[in-house]
Amino acid sequence: MNKVILTLCLFVCLQISSNAEDVLRPKGRIGGTESSGGNGLTGFDGVSPISFGIEGGANLNFFGSTVSVNQTYYDNINVFLAPAGMSMFYNDLGYVFESGFGVSPHIGLFIDVPINDKSGIGLRVSYDSRSFGNSKDGFSNPAIAGIMYDNPTIPFTLEYKDTYDYIAVNLNYRYNFTKEFFMTFGLNFDFLENSKSETTYTSNDPNYPLMSTAVGYVPAINTTAGATAMTTTETKKNNPRMISERFGLEVGANYKFELSNSIALVPYARFQFFVTKPFEDEIVPVPTEFIIDGTMYNLQTLTGETWVSKQTDAYLHTLQLGLSLWFNF
């Protein structure tokens, strides 16, 4: 992947080099002062065709995935638990992780090299923060030795927020439909720098504060030792499931407002469709060691199943809205 990016960047540099003569001695201009006309974005002063600049704005991030539950596992384990009057279930609150939305910033630098009056090639390097989250209200019940009863009745809220920070490299083709309006079509390469996941658990019944379990925080009878908080947040950084390099496609719409012969303000809207998932699929395995009424059991052997739930087919796409400032040199 890195070799591909370096090759494309070298191509852009060669394009810049090939236009060096036009920067110093623009073709078809006497003394280099005649305006080039046409629909080109660059060359506001009629002399320098290469543009560079800075941009910044908001990322509107759209996350989705598929959360699947192995109902066969629950059916089998409940056959074993039924004589003791107990049962296990998958709480619907877990479906909160299936989708998410969030807004986060981006800022970057770019250069644009024209091919002709209407088109050009651009290179952009930026810092992109992509955050998203979701919350779900529902019900839960106290965990008794790790076993939950059906028909939960305690009001409960589960919320999460994920933040992924990338260094993004974009190579794009620009086409001007008019002097002011142009579109870009490009390739995106994201390189992960940091990731953080926050999960917030809230018990909405003061008689049932939170207790920590192997599957997160659940309500507990208030006499349980250490169960005092009504809400708590778990934070995990740099999850090993994260994919460090992502590839995507981009299309953008831009409108130029000339502030002078060599400076322009350009608002833009760009949609980035990423082919690469943000993280690998997650599968929650059936425990091989689980204590029920003081006895250790291998639940995989007991139920004949190996997984409880899984999250697959994750995607993270972004709509970028922002402003860029273009300069000629």
Image (cartoon, rainbow, N blue to C red):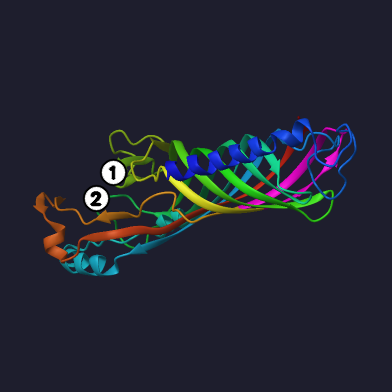
State the SS at label 2.
loop
Q: Which mark is residue 262?
A: none
User: Residue sitting at 66 percent across and 39 percent down?
Assistant: 18
Report the side of 41 relative to 121 (left or right): right
Report the side of 102 relative to 270 (left or right): left
Mark closest to the chain's N terminus, 1 or 2: 2
Q: Nearer the viewer, residue 94 or 272?
A: 272
Q: Which residue is mark 1?
A: 213
Image quarter of residue 211 = top left
Q: Is residue 123 visible?
A: yes
Specify the amino acid type for callout 2.
Answer: Gly
Q: Is residue 200 visible?
A: no
User: Residue sitting at 59 percent across and 39 percent down?
Assistant: 14
Residue 95, position as x, y percentages in the image: 43, 58
Report the side of 4 relative to 321 (left or right): left
As drawn, the residue found furthest toward the left would be 295
Residue 2, position as x, y percentages in the image: 43, 41
Helix, strand or loop for the magenta stretch, by majority: strand
Specify the amino acid type for callout 1.
Answer: Thr
User: Residue sitting at 10 percent across and 51 percent down?
Assistant: 296
Q: Nearer the viewer, residue 185 or 136?
A: 185
Point out the stretch of residues depicted in magenta: 252-271
User: Are the two marked residues, 1 and 2, in contact with CB atoms closer than 8 angstroms?
Assistant: yes
Residue 243, position as x, y percentages in the image: 39, 46
Q: Which residue is mark 2?
A: 146
Examine the structure image and report whether residue 45 is included in the region drawn in magenta. no
Q: CA distance from mark 1 to mark 2?
A: 7 Å
User: Residue sitting at 58 percent across and 46 percent down?
Assistant: 102
